[in-house]
Amino acid sequence: MIEESAMAGRPARAPGAASTATLLCLLLLVIYNANFRLGPSGDTLPARFLPFSLVCDRTLYLDDWVKPYLRGAYEDGGHFLTAARGHWMSSYPIVTPVLVSPLYIAPAWWLRSQPAAARQEAARLIARTMEKLSASLLAALSAAVLYLALLRITTPGAALLVTLVYALAANTWSTSSQALWLHALTQLSFAFLIWALLRCSAPGRREAGGFSAFCAGLALAVAAANKPTNLLVAVFVIAYVFQRHRNRLAAFFVPLLTVGGLVLAYNLYFFGGILGAWSAAKLASGAWGGFGNPNPLALPGLLISPNRGLLVYSPWTVFAIWGAVRLWRENRWDWVRYLIPGVAALVLLYACYDRWWGGYCFGPRYLADVLPFCALFLAGLWPHIRRSRGALGFFIAAVVFSLWVQFVGAFCYTWQWDNRPASVDAHPERLWDWRDSQVLRSWREGRAYPDLYYDWVDYLNARR
């Protein structure tokens, strides 16, 4: 009875929900950091050092921080740095490193206290450590917010189950929590969007509709500022607000216009274009790929290829697709028929990208962005799964397999598969090779070197 009433739109009562969400966040932080290593990625170098530059130097420039890395293939800044106003700056949107920068106040103080001779090595070590902690915190917070959102449509037990599936049986664990890519903040923003939409549509909450609309606008603003591709989802939600809640337009657009104005001013001032570094010469030259030559195999590749397919790495998402279909038919909430096309459009956009596989990474990295929506659709389907023995059995098997895959990604994966016997960027046909599985090869290679642990041991021993 509790579940049925919750699914009908009345939020289930969950005493201690905030405490459970906090404990869940702490548990996930422990799990995400249990491998004692930073995810293998060079893309996150600007996000690694920008918080320190903000706290220590009060600037967005990265010159002194990235100087040791500007050699060899990266002498010209690589694809992750752009020269602007005579300085090196991040080629990526800076919302993620700016938002986590308050976490760096104490580490920056510690760094200043180190001897000058050891400061460069200390900076490298503390920056890598803080990147891992920041990424894992954002990912864990996204799960906590998602849990609070799902409590509005299902029982506490079901909400916790679906949240754990989202947090541990998908790329939230193996990718988003392991390095400061843009995915963790996108997932946190979308989880907050789901919470706001469910809160807005709950009976008895009409008087708080303005606040819910503001939260939805804020979530979309942060998501789009963090990653411009997320504007696709924003367009559909904006259409929903225009159609169904025009009396809340002011509250909804205040954060959108405020954050959008700040991002636009930043892009124009430093890069001279509305898309910032994304519209600079690197994008025009094709260094980052582009959307001009869509591959007909890209969408199947994102879903079912053996080395990037979402349904291969997290087969439980089959139930999420089923859940989306049922939610569309039932039209349980007035916004669901706007949200689902927005999510589909985002997936199709990634399928139009030249490098749809995401470069060197573990599994469907780009589709990590839509995982909060997959969790929502799964929660909507949960009563039907529970009532069918066959569906429940397949769901359990899919989740167990997904957990193993993500464990492999977190503890075993390195760049070896992506680079050998040939670079996957140069030979994307390898993505379809069932005989050379990224997951199985990583599993056979065993646990990856826990570099953060041993680097700290070596550093502390050297200081004795």
Image: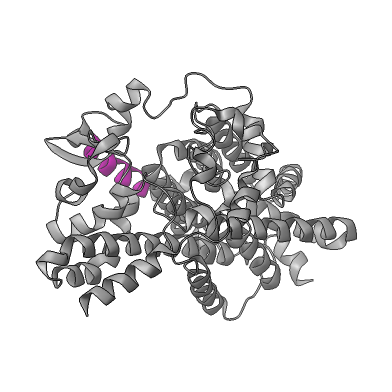
Say whether residue 257 is magenta.
yes
Any part of residue 293 in sight: yes
Quarter of the picture containing the N terminus is bottom right
Quarter of the picture containing the C terminus is bottom left
Specify how the rendered protein is coloured. Answer: one colour
Q: Is residue 442 left or right of residue 38?
A: right
The residue shown at (71%, 44%) is 321
The residue shown at (33%, 63%) is 130
40 versus 287 height, above or below: below
Question: Which secondary structure is most common in the magenta stretch?
Answer: helix
Question: Which quadrant of the structure image shows residue 73?
Answer: top left
Numbered disc total = 0
Q: Which residues are magenta?
A: 254-267
The residue shown at (54%, 63%) is 143
Any part of residue 201 in sight: no
**Residue most extreme to the right:** 389
Image spot of residue 269 (x, y percent): 17, 35
Image spot of residue 49 (x, y percent): 25, 54
Image spot of residue 274 (x, y percent): 29, 30
Image spot of residue 426 (x, y percent): 49, 27
Say whether residue 56 is magenta.
no
Q: Is residue 169 left or right of residue 399?
A: left
Front position in the image: 184 or 345: 184
